[in-house]
Image: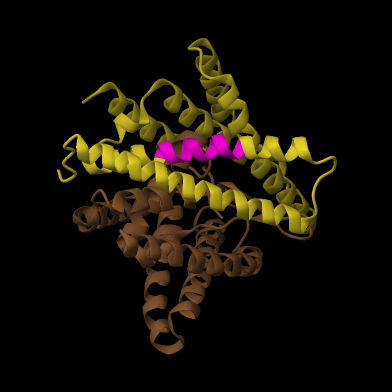
Amino acid sequence: MNKDRLMLLILFFEILLLSFVNNTVFLALYLFLIILLFLVKGGEVNGLILTIKRVIAFSFVLSIAFYLHSLFTGENPYRYILLFNLRLFDMVFSVLFFRDFANPVRAFSFSKTLSYMFTLTYSQIQLFLKVHSEFNMVMRSRMVKSGSYKERLLFFAKMTEYFFKKALRRAENTAMAMKSRGFFLYD
Amino acid sequence: MHIPDGMISPKMYIPLHIVNAGLVVYGFKKIQRKIDEKTLPYIASLSALSFVLMFLQVPLPGGTSVHGVGVAPLAIIFGPWTGFVSISIVLLVQAIFMGVGGITSFSVNALCIGFFGSFTAYYTYLLMKKITGEKPALFIAGFFAIIVAAFFIALSLGIQPVIAHSQDGQPLYFPFGLKTTIPVLLVPHIFVGIGEGLLTLLIYTFVKKRLHNE
């Protein structure tokens, strides 16, 4: 078993264990340790911040919703909010640790075709993320104030169309390159 | 639409992981022979488009936002198993690389969005094509793929307080029941379904034309 697959196996056990634990002290200690380990090993801080931003939006909405709900039911909301947030962040950090210190593509390479599908899809996603950030910067630099609802929808539609055409051309080239190098798709 | 980590109890996700793994392996074997240098670029691009639709939040009046999925074009053009396997890969990439969705909720997301979404789109299309003709059938298939996926997501979340709670009745995973999850998820997804239906129509026409010209 290669190192990446071993790390994947460890991640699965880690997540499985965390999903069973309802002890907030254990979850808090675990969070502290995994953040410490992540930072000591030199994990990518920018990616970490971006992921946390995405998770916080969800965590915030659910925490507020549960707090408001508890005002009607009379139950103490704090234990659940703490438990849910600690467990969520423990799991997110475990996944980030795996992402930064293992090669997920190699870990999931159970079959040659699957690896290619995974790699090709992932490379397209990376392209999309790059174009998305460029489009956003272009729009911001050309607009003094935020556009109307209709303008934003149009922007979204145009960007998606551009993404799709660009990705298709790139994927066609990649597939032709694979074919010309004698790539045999079937395992 | 996706469920993040920590929302689904092990009582539910462990059996669903087993079911999902079995279905992915079966589906992958079924689609393997269809994948060649002509279809692979389309499958990869449509999968990536699906990622984009899930990634880009479309604002709705009132401050909320929702996203499309893009499962219907994949399922209708390449078959429901291709749709399911591709969406599973997208969800896995999102969970591992982007921290969106999650490992524990992966099987619920893949089954609800990928499996039920793909099969609903595919069979709705086949059925409606005979009744309404191709174009309306594509729109209806895209619409129902989203509604059915959102319904199963709402169901999976809504049963959590019943199947997993502490001795004093406090929820341990997702806290709200079916009375909350079904309307909260289904109502906004009616709008998403309309968008998804239109998108299915557009993508299907574009890809079919291009595949036909090659």
Q: Nearer the viewer, residue A7 or B122?
A: B122
Residues drawn in magenta? A122-133
Main SS class of the magenta portion in the image: helix
Report the side of A73 relative to B177 (left or right).
right
> Which residue is pictured at 36% across the width and 65% down the height?
B77
Give residue A78's quadrant in the image.
Answer: top right
Q: How many marks?
A: 0
> Which residue is pictured at 60% across the width and 64% down the height?
B192
Q: Is residue A92 above or below residue B201?
A: above
Residue A149's spot in the image, x, y percent?
77, 56
> Which residue is pictured at 21% across the width and 53% down the height?
B32
- The answer, for residue A87, to whether it is visible in the render is no
- The answer, for residue B203, to whether it is visible in the render is yes
Magenta-span inclusion, residue B24: no
Residue A112's spot in the image, x, y percent?
21, 39
In this view, which residue lies farthest toward the top?
A40
Q: Nearer the viewer, residue A4 or B211?
A: B211
Give residue B208's quadrant in the image.
Answer: bottom left
Quick one: quadrant of the C terminus of chain B? bottom left
The colour applied to the residues of chain B in this rendering is brown
Residue B76's spot in the image, x, y percent?
38, 67
Chain colored yellow: A
In this view, which residue lies farthest toward the bottom?
B131
Q: Is residue B68 above or below residue A31?
A: below
